[in-house]
Image (spheres, rainbow, N blue to C red):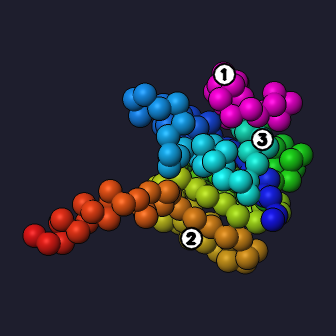
Amino acid sequence: MKTYRAALVGCSRMGAFIDNEVVGSPRIIPPYSHAAGYTACERTDLVACSDVRPEMMEAVAERYDVPKERHYTDYKELIEQERPDIVSVATQPEQRAEIVIHAVENGVKAIYAEKAMAASLEECDRMVEAVERHGVAFNLGTNRRWNAGYDTMKGVIDSG
């Protein structure tokens, strides 16, 4: 079975620590953060992380065993040095388009971006054009789409 090299750009709440918000569970199942998802999946290895704040990467290292030599304050350096198969982009929307397009143009084969997709419709259009041109798989913040609780809630709403 092939294992994919994953990297995290943006190490805050959705990137790595929303799982802490579930009382009494250090690693919830199913995982909510990008980092927890990669850790839980036997087909992915979280190999590197990037954030402009070194202290956030240190916390990721402690929880998810990402070695210090694979912490990058520059996401471009991460992509060039680590050559990940998959990149999660869990930054603020204002940075997301630039990061996604750079990843796509530098060999990343799959991207999981947090929502909102970008800061403007024009940026979204540029992202779509780039992923389509390079044949990159792209997913946008749907980590709970198939959660049974949401299906139940939708059923209750639909039933009136």
Q: Is residue 117 above or below residue 11?
A: below
Quadrant position of the C terminus in the picture: bottom left
Kindly indicate whether the residue at mark 1 contacts the one at mark 2 (C-beta within 8 angstroms): no
Quadrant position of the N terminus in the picture: bottom right
- Percent position of residue 116, x then y: 47, 55
Type of amino acid at the residue the image marks with label 2: Asp
The CA span between labels 2 and 3 is: 28 Å
Point 68% across, 34% down: residue: 64
Q: Which residue is mark 2?
A: 125
Q: Is residue 139 above or below residue 116?
A: below
Which callout, 2 or 1, points at the residue further toward the start of the chain? 1
Q: Quadrant of residue 74?
A: top right
Mark 2: secondary structure: helix
Type of amino acid at the residue the image marks with label 1: Glu
- Percent position of residue 26, x then y: 52, 30
Magenta extent: 51-71
Question: 59 or 75, which lies in front?
Answer: 59
Q: Residues within 10 Å of mark 2 (few under 14, many from 20)?
A: few
Question: 64 or 24, which lies in front?
Answer: 24
Q: Quadrant of residue 146?
A: bottom left
In this rendering, position of residue 119 left or right of residue 137: left
Kindly indicate whether the residue at mark 3 contacts the one at mark 2 (C-beta within 8 angstroms): no
Point 65% across, 25% down: residue: 59
Mark 1: secondary structure: helix
The CA span between labels 1 and 3 is: 15 Å
- Percent position of residue 111, x then y: 66, 60
Point 65% across, 29% down: residue: 63
Q: Residues within 10 Å of mark 1 (few under 14, many from 20)?
A: few
Q: Which residue is mark 3?
A: 48
Type of amino acid at the residue the image marks with label 3: Ala
Q: Which residue is mark 1?
A: 55
Question: 89 or 159, which lies in front?
Answer: 159
